[in-house]
Image: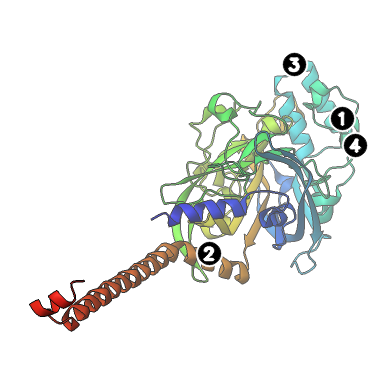
Amino acid sequence: MAWNSIFESVFSDQIALRPDSRSFQSWVAPTIPLFFDVYLFNWTNSENFPEEKPNLVEVGPYRFREHRRHVNVSWHPSNGSIAYKTQRTWYFDETSNVTLQDNITILNIIAASAIYKSREWGYLKQKGLSMGLSMFGEHMAISRLAGELLFEGSDDKFLDLAKSLPISTTGGAPPVDKFGLFYGRNNSIETDGYMEVTTGEQEGVLPGQILRWNHMDSLPYYQGECAKIAGSAGEFMPHNLTEDTQLEIFMGDLCRTVYFNYTETGNLNGLTYLKYSMNENTFDTSNTCFCNGDCAWSGVMNVSACRYGAPAFLSLPHFLHGDPELLTMVNGLNPDPKKHSFYFAIEPKLGVPVDVSARFQFNVFMEPSPNIALYENVPKMLFPVFWVEQKVVVDDSVIAELRKVRAVSDWGATICACVALMFAGFITLASCCKKSYFKKTKVNIITLEKPRDDADVKLNPL
């Protein structure tokens, strides 16, 4: 009857983050192969915009092998937590069907960001920005090699000018010397920020539940419920999941907690899992505290507040589960749940992820700006730039081990009950045999004793 409690106690002790635990060794430097795939949207008719709707052609995946490890680890026994930063290193996988020498045309994000930040400026400042964009040769689109657009970066005169501007103008963004979608991230320990999570050593507390992010215990970008930091940091999940469970995952790239709901049950090499995915309600526009002023479309999230005021909006790839109007703004997008969903497939009893596909699309918000020539006639829209996928599937050896652990969990109580019944039966049988033996012996002794007559009694009184 106590088997489940015993199992939970032992299992929780095994997965707790301690310096000498197996769980910690697997967590601090994961050995599971990680791949980071990037799909770029090549803009083929940029010279005809805004007269023509943008025609986008997906190019990719540009596949990178990722090596991840947690560094600057410090322990806080007083509240049962561990703090760390994450270092990620990417290497281009030469087996990709594309090369870093591909010429790709995308929206000019630097110009779009500058114009977005100028929305609250006065007429003269906006005209000054318009002249500056023209003087530095900024156009609606830029064409670069794929390697430059991704990690290598490329020079931009407008970025050089931004280094000398006051923080109030740049939104507090740190100065950079090159433009790249992931420039400065390779080998950096600052990208994911400072994380503080539970170790799971305290009774009833799961490991890996976020307590603080970037030394904050609430988010300054939002108000009310949206400001809360809660949920798993993405590496440890709750146990005993059901179809009614709602997963809470904190994501630094979104600067918020995201909720995943059950979608289906599946089987991977004999191991049953429950799949939890983002759906139509994940970026529900009714959550106005996440909007920061721009929530014109459902299915997307405004992350400009935690991107130094850049017009960054995130969605699922190809606007999956997004407002249908988003698909009418460009040509070339075809949302497919099998290719573009974001999900966690988890063994429900143990809470171990066995298949994860993390996918996001980066979009830039644009709208007409009468005082800036470059954006004077543009439509109000979200412009897709790229989307990424990070997929992890555990190997067969891990699946086999999980099946064994699950078997112990499922059948342990039954086996213990059978052993207990057998032992009880043996004891009962032994007790019955013992009683029968003593009873039989007593009867035999009585039958062997002769009756004593009066003469015998007189001769032998004792």
| Percent coordinates x, y for residue 20 in the rendering | 72, 53
Instruction: Residue under label 1, please give it.
Output: 162
| Percent coordinates x, y for residue 62 in the rendering | 74, 60
Residue 157 has which mark?
Answer: 4
Label 2 SS: helix
Front position among marks 3 and 1: 1
Front position among marks 2 and 4: 2
Name the quadrant containing residue 254.
Answer: top right
Marks 3/1: CA distance?
A: 19 Å
Marks 2/3: CA distance?
A: 65 Å
**Amino acid type, label 2:** Val
Would you say residue 178 is visible in this rendering?
A: yes
Q: How many marks?
A: 4
**Amino acid type, label 4:** Lys
**Pick the front one: 391 or 33:** 33
Marks 4/1: CA distance?
A: 9 Å
Label 1 SS: helix
Q: Which is more N-terminal, label 1 or label 2?
A: 1
Residue 150, compared with residue 456, is above or below; it is above
Q: Which is more N-terminal, label 4 or label 2?
A: 4
**Pick the front one: 326 or 395:** 395
Rate crowding at label 4 as few (under 14), some (14 to 19) or many (20 or more) other CA atoms within 10 Å.
some
Instruction: Residue under label 3, please give it.
Output: 122
Which quarter of the rendered picture does the N terminus lie within?
A: bottom left
Q: Residue at coordinates 26% horizontally, 74% vertically from top-left?
A: 438
Left or right: 51, with 454 as reference point:
right
Residue 405 has which mark?
Answer: 2
Q: How is the image coloured?
A: rainbow
